[in-house]
Amino acid sequence: MGRTLLSLVGLLFLSCHASITGAKKGVTVEAKGAKLHAKYRDPKQPIDVRIQDLLGKMTLEEKVGQMAQLERQNLTADIIKNYFIGSILSGGGSSPKKNANVEDWVDMVNNFQNAALLTRLGIPMIYGIDAVHGHNNVVNATIFPHNVGLGVTRDPLLVKKIGAATALEVRATGIPYAFAPCIAICRDPRWGRCYESYSEDHVIVQEMTQIIEGLQGEVKTDMKGMPYVLGKKKVAACAKHYVGDGGTVKGINENNTIVDQAGLFGTHMPAYLNSLAKGVATIMASYSSINGVKMHANRDLLTGFLKEKLGFKGFIISDWEGIDRITYPPHSNYTYSIQASILAGVDMVMIPYNYTEFINGLIDLVKKNVIPMSRIDDAVTRILRVKFATGLFENPLVDYSLINKVGCMKHRTLAREAVRKSLVLLKNGKPGKPPVLPLPKNANKILVAGTHSHNLGYQCGGWTIEWQGVSGNNWTAAGTTILNAIKATVDKSTQVTYRKNPGKNFFKKNNFDYAIVVVGEVPYAETRGDSQNLTIPDPGPNIIQNACKAIKCVVVLISGRPVVIEPYLDTMDALVAAWLPGSEGQGVSDVLFGDYGFTGKLARTWFKRPDQLPMNHGDPNYDPLFPFGFGLETKPTTQHNKRIEL
Ligand code: GLC
């Protein structure tokens, strides 16, 4: 038996042995797939040479397997091996176990990867997750403000640093791919996902695509659509949801965006050009439609414009069961869903569970020449290009070396800075009265009231630990509620009283110097956040009225978007829009008490009444309560000019 063959057999045994035992905790097991000396295994070869070499070796089954992304639940090593699965995801809240630690994540990803490396060609799988405001599925991760607040900062450098911090925490758990950023242009706050949008204004959203360079690495020249991921501390990003997801009728999620060419290419599209210039590795198709054409079946925009006209070279991924929803009822003609989406240009399909139906269905359509092999080869070429660019072939397995990055103080300090800059001061003192903010730290007795003043889950919002978000403080040891932040800020001599939901009588028996009232929306995600009335949920309005009619009050509003506040505005002495600030509530008290000044300017129009919607700056009859760009300022009482360097 020749040396080469012997060494190959030996290696095969080694790799099997290593993978069957599974990667020992924290140990990087050198995974060696078959055909070690093939060109596609050689990192010195140009990526396209490696792709063509590998593609030429692949069977139809192996190619179609690369196009399938399955959810981690119920997934086994056998499924990965037998169906040559190319990608796995954690849907919102899908973690290895409840309160999983970072090691649990690393071990889970390594175990799936070892199964993928056992396949004939040893193609590594790519694991994806929604890290949309930090690594938000992971307990103790740094939770940054949602995009609705980051757009207010108008600080691309800050957002780029947030991308870099997020990439580090995602990689620390062994994951090389994040379904972020959402670059939707939310044109109607009735949309349940408006908080995932940086702004109603595409120019701000274009600036915020800097986060892609934080996530993937800084490009030196225009990447012109070529995927670019710089090493083991960066992740492949995903600009989503292509295109026009934020422009649907009445903000109804996944609905129809009726738009002319100017609206489509002038408002909803520009940020995708910025994303391609920054080398975004993947783009996710939107559930929504453009002028009645489902985006998941929209060949003109997926292939004609994005791939052929703009030259996008990464891969297009469907949304969760996105191809099923091409038809109504969803999944009512799955063969058509597969045919329409793949022919339109979708390259990888997020099939949480019914993978055999997809894989067998697609193989059948290729064998019947309904879908040409050239389309499959194009999709697999794009997927392999991203996998090579992400370094997965050289480093398919991970160790524990980055685990201390998750929730580290440097990231929390950065998040605290982002919170400060995301706050918008909408009112500061009643007419003819002096400003209320910044508040004195040395008051005798203050009240902190409201359902959102001591609830980490509420201040983080949706897409946090669970898909729909959580309530309470017991899901993470780290993170600071607004109440605890205030307690840490005021003088020791100041008595801080906390009441979640104080009634009228409570104020008759107590005299406070002032009250800080923190109320707002409870967490939601996607369609569950759609709202036609945009009211502050009870008991928020009552708490505002009870407190503000009794004593001087500063209202801090926790919400994913502008909500109805006009009826209560006159009773408030001051009003702060804090959006969904995330884990670092200290950033709120930093500004309330003058350690930093208010600088934030609205990145969204604040309407008077929902019947005015949709209403965006530049519209005729523009009659907001607070216009786009509005924000009062205060001077800090202490000087700070140190920027956080990551
Ligand atoms: C969801 C969302 C998308 C997310 C995906 C995976 O339905 O639309 O933003 O990336 O599924 O969780």
Image: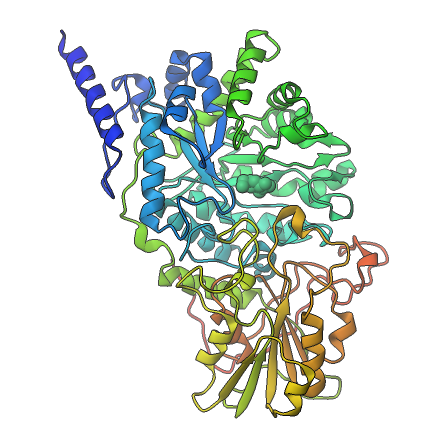
Q: Is residue 3 left or right of residue 340?
A: left
Whole-percent x, y for residue 25 in the image: 24, 43
Q: Is residue 180 left or right of residue 605?
A: left
**Nearer-the-camera pick, 365 or 37:** 365
Asked whether residue 155 is in view, the answer is yes
Q: Quadrant of ligand 1?
A: top right
Asked whether residue 239 is in view, the answer is no
Whole-percent x, y for residue 149 in the image: 58, 60
State the residue at coordinates (69%, 37%): 288
Q: Is residue 490 left or right of residue 24?
A: right
State the residue at coordinates (66%, 69%): 631
Whole-percent x, y for residue 601 in the image: 64, 65
In the rendered image, the quadrant that contains the C terminus is bottom left
In the rendered image, the quadrant that contains the N terminus is top left
Image quadrant of residue 297? top right
State the residue at coordinates (66%, 91%): 508
**Nearer-the-camera pick, 153 or 148:** 148
Residue farthest to the right? Answer: 621
